[in-house]
């Protein structure tokens, strides 16, 4: 029987927001590193909030091994629009890394959690 344990995103300090500082793949921030191996899974829930008066394109590298096939592109609304759901419980494992960068530095904050599913 599988067990679920709620975890902080590994890129977060004490569950606090993570500011997206990078504007390219090479400068992307690490949001979460998934559980090692292939028997357990991380169910990732990720939210964003804009801190700018303009909408901003956000790029999520979801394990990013195969170019654009591993990317999620979203436009984050302006400041005051509240939280936007970016990753709705998608699964990642085997130490894969979820990273993020934006068209404008320091204008998007990320937060969320992981449900670790243990076989």
Image (tube, rainbow, N blue to C red):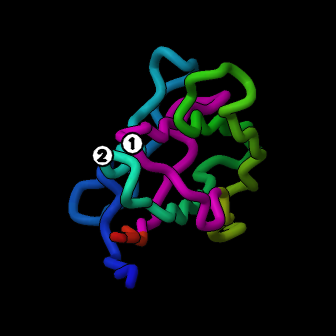
Q: Residue at x 77, y 46 (%)?
A: 75
Q: Quadrant of the N terminus?
A: bottom left
Q: Which residues are magenta?
A: 87-114
Q: Residue at x 43, y 37 (%)?
A: 97
Indicate yes or no whether the magenta region holds residue 12: no
Indicate yes or no whether the magenta region holds residue 89: yes
Q: Name the residue that disc number 1 marks.
A: 94
Q: Is residue 68 left or right of residue 3?
A: right
Q: Name the residue that disc number 2 marks.
A: 36
Looking at marks 1 and 2 on the same chain, the residue that comes earlier in the sequence is marked by 2
Judging depth in this view, the residue of 93 and 11 nearest the camera is 93
Q: Residue at x 36, y 70 (%)?
A: 119
Asked whether the residues under the numbered discs 1 and 2 touch, taking CB atoms below 8 Å apart as contact, a structural biologist would say: yes
Q: How would you rate the neighbour count of disc 2 (Cα within 10 Å): few for under 14, some for 14-19, many for 20 or more? A: some
Q: Residue at x 54, y 60 (%)?
A: 46
- Predominant SS of the magenta segment: strand
Q: Is residue 5 above or below residue 69?
A: below
């Amino acid at each position: 029987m599988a067990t679920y344990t709620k975890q902080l995103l590994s890129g977060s300090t004490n569950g606090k927001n993570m500011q997206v500082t990078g504007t390219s793949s090479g400068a992307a921030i690490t949001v979460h590193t998934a559980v090692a191996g292939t028997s357990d899974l991380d169910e990732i829930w990720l939210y964003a909030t804009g801190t700018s008066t303009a909408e901003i394109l956000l790029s999520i590298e979801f394990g990013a091994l195969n170019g654009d096939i591993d990317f999620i592109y979203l436009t984050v609304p302006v400041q005051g629009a509240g939280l936007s759901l970016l990753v709705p419980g998608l699964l990642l494992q085997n130490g894969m890394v979820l990273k993020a960068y934006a068209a404008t530095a320091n204008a998007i904050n990320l937060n969320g959690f992981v449900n670790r599913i243990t076989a």
